[in-house]
């Protein structure tokens, strides 16, 4: 697998390889799944959004950790 | 075979010099790493910051609750997650960013404060946010 999978632009990590894009699409798909699940049990729009944003931030943090580690590994090789 | 005299050896001796370009490459790589660290720290610290913001808004609309008591309640219910988010992550990222700033400072060779702060301002901001999260958790 050719590294790096991502490049950093400001605070965001942009995929630059197929594996990077797969990871991003998996993250988005998981976020959509979480949104549907939260929406099905919440009582209002604000209830959905408040709970969903927390999960979105966690997904974003894990995605950025993967991107960070891939960039770090590519710098070492 | 004639041995070169000590005097000749001394005359031919050259001091090792690091080329300017190599040093600039080191500095550039260190600054890029510092920015990488600050970006990663931001994405992880935004989780406790979001919770703190939510508790502040809650205390604004519900006068009987306040930020500190809400954090204590959260700590009782989810001890491991709260400790990870409000204690371990800010500590780790504050240390990581301090090391980055220190490395950049030494490689820059005693730079003037204002241009240096312009380069590492986001790392300084991350350290400040980490300290705020730690204070909220410890209180």
Image (cartoon, rainbow, N blue to C red):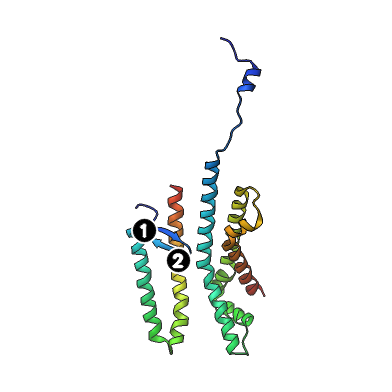
Left or right placement of residue A38 versus residue B54 in this view: left
**Residue drawn at x 47%, y 67% as measured from the top left:** A61
In the figure, B28 relative to A14: above or below?
above
Q: Quadrant of the C terminus of chain B?
A: bottom right
- Can residue A70 be seen here? The reply is yes
Tell me which chain the residue with mark 2 is part of.
Answer: A
The chain ID associated with circle 1 is A
Image position, residue B79 (x, y; %): 56, 74
Q: Residue at x 42, y 58 (%)?
A: A7
Task: Tell which residue pokes out farthest to the top in this image.
Answer: B1
Q: Which residue is mark 2?
A: A62
> Few, some or many C-alpha atoms within 10 Å of disc 2 (few <14, some 14-19, many ≥20)?
some
Residue B92 in sight here? no
Give the percent coordinates (x, y) of residue A65: 46, 62
Q: Residue at x 44, y 74 (%)?
A: A56
Which secondary structure lies at badge 1? loop
Expressed as whole percent of the image width and height from the top left, the position of residue A12 reads: 45, 64
Foreground of the two, A9 or B67 = A9
N-terminal of the pair, mark 1 or mark 2, is 1
Circle 1: is it few (<14), some (14-19), or many (20+) Cα within 10 Å?
few
Q: Quadrant of residue B49?
A: bottom right
Mark 1 or 2: the one toward you: 1
Q: Which residue was labeled with disc 1?
A: A16
State which quarter of the image contains the N terminus of chain B: top right
The percent coordinates of residue B98 (x first, y second) are 61, 58
Question: Is residue B30 shown above or below B2?
Answer: below
The lab-note entry on whether marks 1 and 2 share a chain reads yes
Q: Secondary structure at mark 2?
A: helix
Q: Nearer the viewer, residue B117 or B62?
A: B117
Point 52% across, 54% down: residue: B33
Q: Is residue B13 above or below residue B24?
A: above
Give residue B124's mark: none
């Amino acid at each position: 697998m050719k590294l790096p999978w991502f490049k950093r632009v400001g605070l965001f990590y942009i995929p630059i390889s197929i594996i990077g894009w797969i990871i991003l699409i998996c993250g988005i798909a998981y976020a959509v799944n979480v949104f549907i699940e939260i929406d099905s049990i919440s009582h209002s729009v604000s209830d959905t959004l408040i709970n969903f944003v927390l999960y979105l931030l966690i997904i974003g943090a894990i995605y950025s950790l993967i991107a960070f580690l891939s960039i770090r590994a590519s710098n070492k090789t | 075979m004639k041995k070169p005299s000590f005097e000749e050896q001394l005359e031919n001796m050259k001091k090792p010099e690091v080329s300017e370009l190599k040093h600039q490459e080191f500095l550039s790589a260190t600054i890029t790493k510092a920015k990488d660290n600050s970006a990663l720290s931001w994405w992880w610290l935004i989780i406790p910051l979001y919770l703190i913001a939510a508790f502040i808004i809650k205390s604004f609309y519900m006068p009987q609750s306040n930020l500190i008591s809400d954090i204590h309640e959260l700590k009782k219910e989810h001890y491991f997650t709260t400790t990870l988010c409000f204690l371990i992550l800010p500590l780790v990222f504050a240390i990581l960013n301090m090391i980055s700033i220190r490395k950049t400072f030494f490689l820059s060779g005693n730079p003037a404060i204002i241009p240096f702060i312009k380069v590492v301002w986001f790392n300084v901001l991350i350290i400040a946010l980490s300290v705020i999260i730690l204070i909220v958790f410890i209180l």
